[in-house]
Image (cartoon, grey):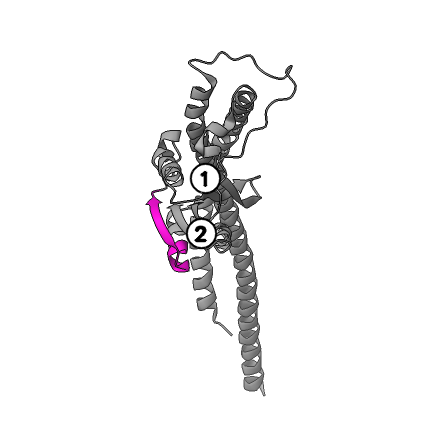
Amino acid sequence: MPSTKEIRRRIKSIKSTRQITRAMEMVSAAKMRKAQMQALATRNYAALAWELLNNLAAKGDPNIHRLLRQPERTAQIGIILMSSNRGLIGGFNAAIARSGIELAKKYSAAGFITMGKKARDAVRKAGYQIVADFEKKETVGSVLDINSLASLAVNEFLGGKFDKVFLVHMSFVSTLVQKPAAMELLPLRKPQPVQNTEQMRDYLFEPSVDYVLENILPRLTTMQIYQALLETNAAEHSARMVAMKNASDAAGDLISDLTLEFNKIRQGNITREISEIVAGKLALTN
């Protein structure tokens, strides 16, 4: 049975840890709110971009662009894998890595473009090729932050290195729910022409529909990657806040249990000392 001194030391240590987890919880909560607002705001932009593309498809030929053409065969794929840089986030990074590795196993060859230290480490451990590793900033700025990554993915696809490019990230559902998502990024899924002419917006294209399509598709690819980064960032801060809250709650429960155990031992010691005093007095009296 541990001594009261040892229990007191454990309680002090756990209280110190709880202060840290509470501080991290508050920091994550503040970052989470900003990240969630960013992710939700750009969802509307992405939806409007697809609406524009659908209208373009109704007025032009979407097959003219190489980013829309399906490959004759799929020998090697590229996987953009996004994760966090740090741990203390539960099974967040493990779920993303597992989703990416399982996808790679379905094809004969795969190369990874990683963003986030945990993604890079997981791919190296699995033994797959890392084509490029990009730094993931703690705070997501503008779409310019992923221009280099998007350009690399598009160029590798157009150059024939990758027959298809997939995007694996964490999708933000709610503060308590985050789900790994794997989507085929390239070739882009063909837009469906708007059938109802009443739903079509009236656009004036200069110099031509095909020229606009040629320029908007790479930007749409970049936007999808940017949206995935925002989703991953929002999911990361949400998951870390929940993980730190759970850790703080668990520390509180452990402190309560140790305090109860401390009081029981202390009460037992007091009872034993009283019994010894009474026994000694009786012995002297007799």
Q: Secondary structure at mark 2?
A: loop
In depth, the one of 127 and 267 nearer the eye is 127
In depth, the one of 258 and 134 nearer the eye is 134
Residue 109, above or below 139: below
Residue 66, above or below 53: below
| Residue 187 at least partly seen | yes
The amino acid at mark 2 is Leu
Q: Quadrant of residue 194?
A: top right
The residue that label 2 is drawn on is 88
- Nearer mark to the viewer, of 1 and 2: 1
| 155 in the magenta segment | no
Residues at marks 1 and 2, CA–CA distance in whole angstroms: 15 Å
> Where residue 227 sits in the image (x, y, percent)?
47, 34
Q: Is residue 183 left or right of residue 16?
A: right
> Where residue 165 sits in the image (x, y, percent)?
45, 42
The residue that label 1 is drawn on is 233
Q: Is residue 172 left or right of residue 216?
A: right
The part of the chain drawn in magenta is 121-135
* Quarter of the C terminus within the rendering: bottom right
| Residue 86 at least partly seen | no
Q: Earlier in the sequence, mark 1 or mark 2?
A: 2
Callout count: 2
In depth, the one of 236 and 148 nearer the eye is 148
| 130 in the magenta segment | yes
The residue depicted at 41 percent of the width and 55 percent of the height is 122
> Where residue 243 sits in the image (x, y, percent)?
51, 49
Residue 51, above or below 184: above
Q: Do the numbered discs 1 and 2 sit on residues whose CB atoms are within 8 Å? A: no
